[in-house]
Amino acid sequence: MLKVGFWFDVPANYSGGINYIKNILYALSLVNDEAVCPYIFFPNDIPQNIEEQFIPLATVVKTKIIQRGTVLWFLNKVLYKVFGSMILINALLKSHDIEVLSHVWFTYKGRIPFRLIGWIPDFQYLHLPEFFPDIDTYKETRQNQNIISQSEIVILSSHNALEDFKSIAAPEHKSRGTVLQFVSQTSNIVSPKTISLQSMEKKYGFKGKFFFLPNQFWKHKNHMLVLQAVKLLKDKGVDVLLLCTGALKDLRIKNIEYIDGIYDFVNNNLQAQVKILGHIDYSEVLVMMKNSLAVINPSRFEGWSSSVEEAKSMGKTIILSDIGVHIEQNPPNGRYFDPDDVLGLSIILEEIWFTPTGISQEKAEEKARQLLHKRTIEFGNNYLKIIKDVEQRAKPCTDSLVSRCNI
């Protein structure tokens, strides 16, 4: 049995990463022929509710090496920065007999004691550098090139991303890129507690029908266009309700003017039409999505949109920007608009606001449920094939971590 590890060295409130790994482990569990034993390594202070969601899907290992602010975390950072050493991480992984690291974001300095499956979620910094002034495009590309050179296979979430991959990969590494389009679960792997719409209305202070925008408040997510469309409707006497959830701060940039501008626009123009709820529990996100008139994703760039996939899995109507990856995702109940066209979006919103859903929505949900299992099986098989392809390749150095393989 091949032991495959996932190293989750990101903040616990990075819901997109949590849900992505959870979805991939769930899909793997449906097709795993006992050839693969997955492990996930979490910080020691991972919230219990998150840990519990992973226990049926993988062996959960908690460690202070990932827990920010601990002595081991600090020591690991110093060892890597000063000596290029990952001896603490390597020793922990070796103690659990991990042979393959999947979805690796970091790079090694020196020889590599494991087989690596890299993961680059997207290349938005190449397309929208003006939205990420704190990111050094050259350094980001070099980091991605190092991931590519050290990995036996690099997972990309879309064919769109694969083209960007090929644009930066060395000629001898271009064949390492592979597309794995993930499928989002909306009932099988979320918290089992039942949440009523009525309890959500009471908790968050809204009532009646609404549109739902569950994107992080990052500048390229293009929230302002939707707010301007809602204001356009308000000015003509059409009051819609928009609920927004997601992290309020982009950790990659220092500037907070974007979210401040969002709040100012809402407070000055749309206090009755828009509610910004921030980061909420994922189970609540799914309840809101299920009960919304439609999901909105106005983003200017995506690797492979989770909200689009979740809407597909529920059979929801989704109103989305006509960027390449959204077109590639091809939701059956999608309505596309230009991400710069406020008027065009407002027309779609008004049409859906006054159009009854009725039985057609019920049929859409039933059809989505029927397709979800098939799509998930295909997703799991595609990932299992990637693992087995890597397993068949020559193993890297397995000598003592403190001798010739010391890194």
Image (spheres, rainbow, N blue to C red):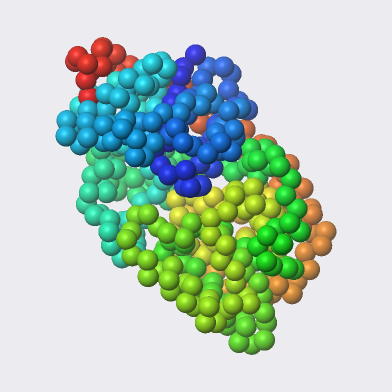
Q: How many marks?
A: 0
Image position of 211 with respect to 64: above or below: below
Image quadrant where residue 56 sits: top right
**Residue positioned 28% across, 62% down in the render:** 133
Residue 197: give x, y in percent of width and height.
Answer: 74, 57
Residue 66 percent location from the top left of the image: 38, 34
Q: Residue at x 32, y 45 (%)?
A: 166
Up the image or down, 160 lies above or below 385; here it is: below
Q: Position of residue 406 (x, y in %)?
A: 21, 20
Quick check: 226 left or right of 196?
left
Query: Which residue does the image show at 58% across and 54% down from the upper left?
Result: 280
- Left or right? Give the position of 169 relative to 218: left
Q: Is residue 255 visible?
A: yes
Q: Is residue 81 left or right of residue 94?
A: left
Which residue sits at x=63%, y=77%? 272
Name the outermost residue toward the right: 359
Please identify the quadrant where the C terminus is shown.
top left
- What is the residue that sits farthest to the bottom in this orientation? 236
Q: Position of residue 215 (x, y in %)?
A: 52, 58
User: Going by the picture, which residue comes out furthest to the left?
Assistant: 82
Is residue 393 visible from the viewing direction of this image?
no
Q: Is residue 172 left or right of residue 240?
A: left
Against 124, is 73 above or below? above
